[in-house]
Amino acid sequence: MSASHHDPLSHPEVQLASGRGYVANFLVTTLLMGFGLWLSVTHAVAPLTLVAVTSGIAAVAVGVQAYLLLHMNLSEAQIWHTVAMILFLPLFVVTIGLTAWMFHGLYARTMIMSPHIGAFLHR
Amino acid sequence: MSVMSRSENARSLGLWDRDHEGHDVIGTRTFGFWLYMLTDAMVYAALFATFGVLSHVVNLAGGPSPAAVVHPVYAYGETVALFVSVLAYGGAMVALKAGNKAALIGALGAAMVAGGVFLGLAYSDIERLFHAGIVPQASGYLSIFFGLILYHALHILVGMVWMLVMIVQVMTRGFTSNVVYRLINLRLFWHFQAVIWVFVFTFVYLQGTVL
């Protein structure tokens, strides 16, 4: 990449910018989050369904952002960014998932749940 | 192989010699900063894990439930402001690609303003809660709620200060390698905040309405 040494603007990290991609990302993620908002304020679906659907919406939105904003792809200039992200994901999921699983078990075994709380949790 | 010849070898590969033709200043520094952003994301992982634990009903300590605290319509206003700011920064990157200094500075200014709108909305939401007696020390849930949104707001503030610094550097130094890699690092930083905000909006605000 000797050219980049002389002209920083010719570097692949600069050249990957895409106005069309950024606009598409803005429209798609804003609409997805708006749909999630509509679901939660209208109480259109049951609470557990809301949790499942909004989690799915978030996953799609983050996927779109990863591709269009963060340029996660397999091109020569970006592949190591993508590899680092993919190796990072299990750490992120395991950190949150194991903590949630561990405390879920702990609460079930140690916390005194009133009938009200029990009904609240299982509605 | 002697130490001298090994260092000569490394030098010939362009690894340590900044002035070597093959040394990719922009590529190595932006990748290093990307790894730092993933480290920052692990701090968010810890915060989200804590949020998952402390938003459980046993941690309300007699305080308000998440449904009584979160205001998803208000938070959607913050979402749009942040996404507009991210779009404006994308515009700054398109201007950088075209070598258009005036458009780059204008887009950075627009991204800063939209970031300011996000912070203003976040501030008035927090003020509303504080006036209602909903404060971090009231319960475990409220501690992590405020901790999480303030940690994110702090990132937005840092990003806005960084944008101001970059506007000055672009005006005074032009598109040197150092200025360009800093602009790209700020892109990674700023666009990553939008990704994190999708998680905050979904898990704290949208799903908070049914907790």
Image (cartoon, coloured by chain):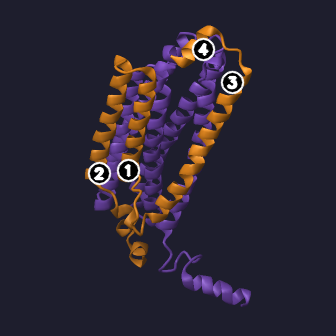
* Residue B113 seen from this side: no
Q: Earlier in the sequence, mark 2 or mark 4?
A: 2
Give the residue at mark 3: A107
Spatial separation of the CA atoms under disc 3 and disc 4: 12 Å
Classed neighbour count for the residue bearing mark 1: other residues with Cα under 10 Å, few (<14), some (14–19), many (≥20):
many
Image disc number at residue B147:
none
Residue indicated by mark 1: A69
Q: Amino acid at mark 4?
A: Gly
Q: Which chain is purple?
A: B
Residue position for label 2: A21
Residue A69 against residue A108 in the figure, above or below: below
* Residue at mark 1 shares a chain with residue at mark 4: yes
Q: Could you say where residue A9 lies in the image, as x and y percent from the top left? A: 36, 66
Q: Chain of mark 4?
A: A
Determine if marks 3 and 2 fall on one subunit: yes
Q: Residues within 10 Å of mark 3 (few under 14, many from 20)?
A: some
For residue A10, above or below residue A98: below
Q: Secondary structure at mark 1?
A: loop
Task: Tell me whether the residue at label 3 lies in contact with that at label 2, contact meaning CB atoms closer than 8 angstroms.
Answer: no
Comparing labels 3 and 1, the label whose residue is closer to the camera:
3
**Amino acid type indicated by mark 3:** Tyr
Q: Earlier in the sequence, mark 3 or mark 1?
A: 1
Q: Earlier in the sequence, mark 2 or mark 1?
A: 2
Residue A118 badge: 4
Indicate left or right for B140 with B20 as reference.
Answer: right
Kind of residue at badge 1: Leu
